[in-house]
Amino acid sequence: MKQVIKDPDLFRLFENCFPNTLDTAITWKGLSWRNASSYLPTDINSPDPTPKPTGNNDPEEELTFITTGDIPAMWLRDSAHQLTSYSPLLTPSNSTSSLASLYRGLINLQARYILTAPHCNAFLAPQNPSSPLPSSPKTIHECKYELDSLASFLSLIHTYLTQTSDTPFLTTSLNLLPALKRILSITTDLQTGTYSRTGTVSYAPYQFQRLTTTSTETLPNAGSGPPFHPGTNLVRSAFRPSDDACTYQGFIPGNMMFSSYLSLLSPYISPISPSTSKKISKLAAEIRAGIEDHGRIDHRLYGRIYAYEVDGYGSHSLMDDANIPSLLSAPLLGGYLDRRDETYQRTRRFALSKMNPYYMFGPVLNATGGPHIGPGMAWPMGLIVQALTSDDDEEIYSCIKQLLSSTDGLGLMHESVNTHSVSVWTRHWFSWANGLFGQLILDVNKRKPHLLARSYQ
């Protein structure tokens, strides 16, 4: 890439960002250990929960623990995306020191966690005497149910299989297929609405409450969330990929991502479990129908566009958030739709306009942000996704130039940056965003290499 990227500052930023996860976030990798498992506490708030082994144990199972970078915990979503950045370099290999081994290890560990606590989104390092990481009987770091966490697990599997053609891994990984079946079970349960046909309140399969002064850190209605209409075919999500509570639990980008990767995985599963494959295909089709029936609304300026969230009663949230999956990222979500799709293009124009309440603009950075950090703070991740979904040379050039000038001299991607002051930002570096920036430069090199010959000063 040094021979391709002519701007020395842009190359230095790529050189810093692209290997960031491999350099700093692969905090433990190794083989399985005796009685290795995640643990299911009877009460995740208890200081001393009783560990309960779950899943199958293979002493030769590869395991990989990846932190977000500056937090000593592993998010299912973040870690999957962090490795996805390296998919162009992924090739078949049985070596335990290979990139393929990192992928297998992460899939195996995520499968254990999903079997243990399928509604949880972030985990601490499992107990293992050979790991340098601090361990605790409490394996769960955070138990916010986010549909995109499960969708990210599916995307990780799909990326590995398409890049390596290692289909035997589906059976040699003892916990992978059981984890997929568990995902089908809990997401099917979460297609139900708040009320039954007779008007009684249905049991909410996921409930979450905590003492907080921030409304997006807990759920209303005794922890079961806002009412959701039955029969939409959408899978409910309590929280967004930002870890903020959903306003309406029909989270459209999460359903897009989940439906796409279910469809993509079904052919791989068919030879080893035809019945599971049929269930996967059926659920994927149901969700897609639900998205198209309930996830599109008529905007007074932009016409027919996708809503960010819906409740099935007619209420909807018109916004977009920088965190992936987002409406802006829809073509990147397993190809849910083509970037030239008219509804997507209208939605994209809305998301990148001042009609999106979380589109931040100013002299420093112009990009989507979100309520997680708040108004005035644009996310480099949003700008990267804008460039990845654009075919316009000048738009892509502008995005890259803004990213290059927004690091405050630290040479890495922040989580968010104040649109009017480059020195006001959150997180010195954000491993997922760093990898995504690397993806962008590789994508530009593939689609529009002439842009890398330009100056970005």
Image (cartoon, grey):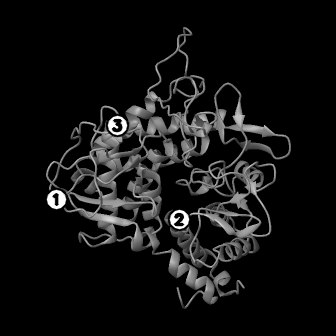
Left or right: residue 439 compared with residue 49: right
On the image, which quarter does residue 8 sit in? bottom right
Amino acid type at image mark 3? Arg
Residue 273 vertical position relative to residue 90 in the rendered view, above or below:
above
Q: In this rendering, does residue 176 appear at all? A: yes
Depth check: give the residue in front, 127 or 358: 127
Among numbered discs 3 and 2, the one appearing first in the sequence? 3
> Which label number is shown at residue 430?
2
Residue that label 3 marks: 182
Look at 28% across and 37% down and name the residue there. 49
User: Callout 3: 10 Å neighbours few (<14), some, many (20+)?
Assistant: some
Query: In whole angstroms, how far apart are the C-alphas of marks 3 and 2?
Result: 31 Å
Which quadrant is home to the C terminus? bottom right
User: Callout 1: 10 Å neighbours few (<14), some, many (20+)?
Assistant: few
Residue 12 at x, y percent in the picture: 56, 84
Secondary structure, mark 1, is loop
> Which label number is shown at residue 386?
none
Residue 43 vertical position relative to residue 58 in the rendered view, above or below:
above
User: Callout 2: 10 Å neighbours few (<14), some, many (20+)?
Assistant: many
Residue 196 at x, y percent in the picture: 53, 14
Amino acid type at image mark 1? Glu
Tell me, yes or no, whether the two marked residues, 3 and 2, touch with CB atoms within 8 Å. Answer: no
Amino acid type at image mark 2? Phe
Secondary structure, mark 3, is helix
Among numbered discs 2 and 1, the one appearing first in the sequence? 1
Residue that label 1 marks: 60
On the image, which quarter does residue 119 sit in? top left
Look at 51% across and 63% down and name the residue there. 432
Look at 66% across and 84% down and name the residue there. 450
Among numbered discs 3 and 1, the one appearing first in the sequence? 1
Secondary structure, mark 2, is loop
